[in-house]
Image (cartoon, rainbow, N blue to C red):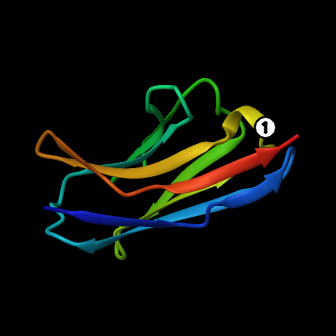
Amino acid sequence: QVQLVESGGGLVQAGGSLRLSCGVASGIILSSNIMGWGRQAPGKQRELVATITKGGSTNYADSVKGRFTISRDNAKNTVYLQMNSLKPEDTAVYYCSITQRGYTYWGQGTQVTVSS
């Protein structure tokens, strides 16, 4: 069992920026894993926003390309999400994740609210 803890959410005006952080509170982290961020807006399914491998390869959802940047610190088992040019439609609970040996663990989430 891996426990993840997110921080950095909040309220921001459209066009603003936020940086989310996520660390491993407990559990065993394997040498091969993928970390990422997902989000879930009210009444919608959770969607994967960005992922990053331990080697630094990244993938983004089309809706955030060019605005969000995912990064990680392997020594600290920490993943970050820099969100720029935020839009009201980015409002959601953001969850970090780690996938290893085919299983994905999720954090408890942090609320991001973008006002127009």
Across and down, in percent, residue 66 comes to: 71, 35
Q: Is residue 20 rendered to the left or right of residue 57?
A: right
Residue nearest the viewer, comparing 85 with 90: 90
Figure quadrant of the C terminus = top right
Which residue sits at x=86%, y=44%? Answer: 14
The secondary structure type at the circle numbered 1 is loop
Q: Amino acid at mark 1?
A: Lys
Q: Is 39 placed above or below 79 here?
A: above
Which residue sits at x=77%, y=37%? Answer: 88
Across and down, in percent, residue 42 comes to: 56, 34
Across and down, in percent, residue 71 comes to: 51, 56
Figure quadrant of the N terminus = bottom left
Q: Is residue 39 rendered to the left or right of residue 97?
A: right
Q: Is residue 11 rendered to the left or right of residue 14?
A: left
Residue nearest the viewer, comparing 95 with 83: 95
Residue nearest the viewer, comparing 15 with 77: 15
Dot 1 corresponds to which residue? 87
Across and down, in percent, residue 81 comes to: 57, 54
